Amino acid sequence: MKLDHIYRQIIFDHYRQKRNFTELLGENVFKVHYKNPTCGDVMTLYLEVKHDIVNKVAFLGEGCSISMASSSMMTELIQNKTLGEILSLRNAFEELIRTGELTDPNIDLGDSYSLQGVHHLKARHNCALMPWQALDKALKEIVE
Ligand code: ZN
């Protein structure tokens, strides 16, 4: 079985059965809306950060399979991580999408690594990066 075939299965699995696809409520929940200007994908990201750790994360949205799978994967990846760890993951994931490679081989991107092939599809980079851009926006507002 070819590696890309396995990757495609992981992507479709997340697209069909989105993880953490729900609204989060609570006074400590922070929410941001984000729209991908190039593809029309939209999402709302919900985050609860406690003592520098992402305690809860969820999303709602609609869009292409890449954007939705990437969002689902990201919510699994950042759960229970510190903001510092999340920043490293975010930078590594962007590098993977932009260049197809990872400088630091020890970084574990979990299922998000399966989006590596998007590197070849320049017009879809923003789809894969959408949840991470939403996260940037949220963290900027949370930290301020
Ligand atoms: Zn898209």
Image: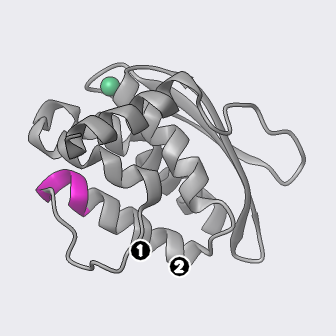
Label 1: which secondary element: helix
Q: Mark 1 packing: few (<14 Cα in 10 Å), some, or many (20+)? A: few
Left-right relation of 71 to 99: right
Question: Picture quarter containing residue 22?
Answer: top right
How many numbered discs?
2
The residues colored magenta run 95-99
- Viewer-side residue, 137 vs 47: 47
Q: Residue at x 84, y 54 (%)?
A: 28
Whether residue 16 is visible, yes or no, is yes
Label 2: which secondary element: helix
Q: Is residue 44 magenta?
A: no
Query: Label 2, on which residue?
Result: 84
Question: Picture quarter containing residue 90?
Answer: bottom left
What type is the residue that disc 1 sits on?
Ser
Left-right relation of 136 to 93: right
- Viewer-side residue, 104 vs 143: 104
Q: Is residue 97 magenta?
A: yes
Q: Residue at x 23, y 40 (%)?
A: 1
**In the image, the residue with mark 2 has its CB under 8 Å from the nearest atom of ligand 1:** no
| Measured Cα–Cα span from mark 2 to mark 1 | 7 Å
Query: Label 1, on which residue?
Result: 88
Proximity of marks 2 and 1: CB atoms separated by less than 8 Å:
yes
